Amino acid sequence: MPIAKKIETEAGFLGIWEISETSDSLLKEYQFSSKEKEEFEKIKAEKRRIEYIASRLLVQNLLNVKNEIIYEATGKPILKNQAFNISISHSANLVAVLISKKNIGVDVELCNRNIDKVAKRFLSNEEFRTVENSNNPQIAKIIYWGAKESIFKCSDYNGVHFYKQILISPFPIGDEGIFDGKLISGTDTEYFKLWYFTFQNNMVVFCVEDKTKAM
């Protein structure tokens, strides 16, 4: 199994799979349920087929038992008959899965992904200035984007405006680090602790809801 990284964190168990095989070769490693087989056979794109199997193999490895991934009406993944939460993300060459009993989210992005055209749609004015004044604006944008994606995946709110509802506290930009964020919806505010690190030209960002700050 090409698991590139497996770590236990405060947020939960994080597994990263490097995409290097074909879907046909991965089929030999995984035993489908009837529902999974039906879902899989509807997928035509090769990359999506690989991601489907790899994410489930990661779950199996992290939990040491096979478990089905099902989806809520919102599209949020959940583990069938498990007390664990799950978050999944894909980049061009990696699949990441985070599993925890806490509320969590994960995002993985290529470090050289060009998101300049959408930066002002997910960064607040203050965040945009902070990013542009950082020592590495490209990496800063990728971290902020991953942070906001992770928080969005963690939260149950829909229709969130990233630039004004998900806010990130300033932090030093490096190869890895820890920082804070929050999501504001009406009179409610959710707080999050976030981690990031670079891995094989990817930025991995993940979060856990920090309920202590809401008290």
Image (cartoon, grey):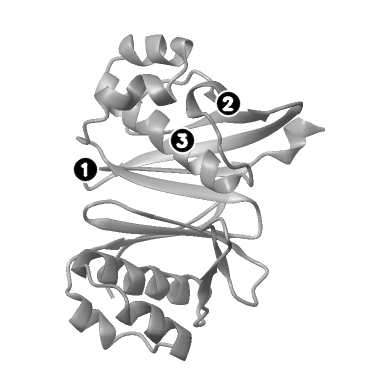
Q: Are marks 1 and 3 in contact (CB under 8 Å)?
A: no
Tag of residue 165:
2
Tell me the quarter of the image containing the C terminus: top right
- Write the residue at 50% across / 79% down: 64
What amino acid is found at the position of numbered circle 1 in the picture?
A: Asn
- Write the residue at 39% across / 89% down: 31
Mark 2 vs mark 1, foreground winner is 2
Considering the numbered disc 3 on the image, is that residue within a helix, a strand or a loop?
helix
Q: Earlier in the sequence, mark 2 or mark 1?
A: 2
* CA gap, disc 1 and disc 3: 17 Å
Please name the residue that numbered disc 3 is placed on. 147
Mark 1 vs mark 3, foreground winner is 3
Considering the numbered disc 2 on the image, is that residue within a helix, a strand or a loop?
helix
What amino acid is found at the position of numbered circle 3 in the picture?
A: Ala
Please name the residue that numbered disc 1 is placed on. 201
Residue 186 image point, x, y percent: 72, 27
Tell me the quarter of the image containing the N terminus: bottom left
Residue 141 image point, x, y percent: 33, 26
* CA gap, disc 2 and disc 1: 29 Å
For residue 122, above or below residue 34: above
For residue 22, above or below residue 130: below
Q: Is residue 141 left or right of residue 200?
A: right
* CA gap, disc 3 and disc 2: 13 Å
> Can you tell which quarter of the image residue 119 is in?
top left
Q: Earlier in the sequence, mark 3 or mark 2?
A: 3
Residue 73 image point, x, y percent: 58, 61
